[in-house]
Amino acid sequence: NGDDYVIRFLTPPDEKLQLQDLIRGTIQIDTNVLDDKVLFKSDGMPTYHLANIVDDHLMEISHVIRGEEWLPSLALHKQLYDAFGWTAPEFAHLPLIMKPVGKGKLSKRDGEKMGFPVFPLSWNDSVGYKESGYFPEAVVNFLALLGWNPGTEQELFSLEELVKTFSLDRVNKSGARFDPEKTKWYNQHYLQETANAELAASFLPMVKEHTTDEDKINLEYVTKVVSLIKERAVFVSDFWDLSDYFFVAPTEYNAKAAKKQWKEDTAVIMNELISVIESIEDFSSENSETMVKAWIGEKELSFGKVMPPLRLFLVGDMKGPHIFDIMAMVGKEESIARIKTALEKLG
């Protein structure tokens, strides 16, 4: 009559299908619970089920590795291979990645709600792992450990180690709960392993947004800064907050720290310290430390009366690496200028 029609797969009744999955082992399915799936739609186009099977066969696919939500389709796909007289590939249905909290699989909405990426690259209005500052090695590493374990306590793997170690027989059947904080832990590890010069090259454009001082926007200087602060960072984007005082003198001071560190004799002590710093010819970190500590000993001062205020004056806060490393980096004149500015503003 020219009516539209579909073509379905006729599932044989009263059979027990023995299906093999590399992760789940043998799966037995009663064909009586299966329906007759559409293979060609009424417009003559094949459904995904048929197209997928034909495509994989023509490409000589050896392994089909996919999420466990495709497990219900395994019976039809295996029957289609058999019906065509083709050798089926091996199947492995991976566990789902679950929400960090609660039940259900991880979704884009979970990432938006909790502030972590769920895509490898930025897509539509969602920021990806690459744009968020994650290293490729970190992403590969934490993905491999989602639903798989090597049978040891080892958590950090290079790509070469994963190639040698990874096997589907150690993939878990149950879902793997996603831990956003663990992804940061991996990234921090790979950041520490990355060469300082490489990190500095990535950080340099950010530095140039905040200063035009030619002495401080060269790669050699920025590399030295990175070497001093990288161990506290998780992402390259953390570098500026950790190191701004290396590039720009502080104009404001942590109020709580200022109240705690400013004593009656602070101004007198710090003015004397300026004279000590002025007398230092070799302004290396090691020599400056020796000279200042010798002066502290001669004056019978406590380190608490000198070192914490000095850090506050140079940095603007009680943060940063070894104080004499900071002084050596910014230089004698800049160190003295910062102390004088703080004395004026806080005195």
Image: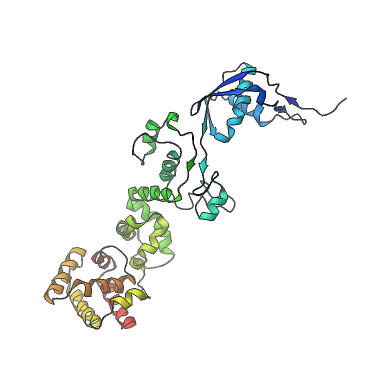
Q: Is residue 90 left or right of residue 208?
A: right
Looking at the image, what colour scheme do you see? rainbow
Q: Nearer the viewer, residue 202 or 21?
A: 21
Residue 71, horizontal then vertical, whole percent: 58, 31
Q: Is residue 116 left or right of residue 58?
A: left
Residue sitting at x 42%, y 39%: 145
Quarter assignment of residue 318: bottom left
Q: Nearer the viewer, residue 172 or 195?
A: 172
Q: Nearer the viewer, residue 158 or 75?
A: 75
Name the residue furthest left: 298
Q: Is residue 299 left or right of residue 77?
A: left
Residue 225, horizontal then vertical, whole percent: 32, 60
Quarter assignment of residue 218: bottom left
Residue sitting at x 66%, y 31%: 48
Q: Nearer the viewer, residue 223 or 233?
A: 233
Quarter of the image that includes the C terminus: bottom left
Q: Is residue 20 left or right of residue 221?
A: right
Quarter assignment of residue 268: bottom left
Residue sitting at x 32%, y 70%: 315
Residue 332, horizontal then vertical, whole percent: 24, 71
Quarter of the image that includes the N terminus: top right
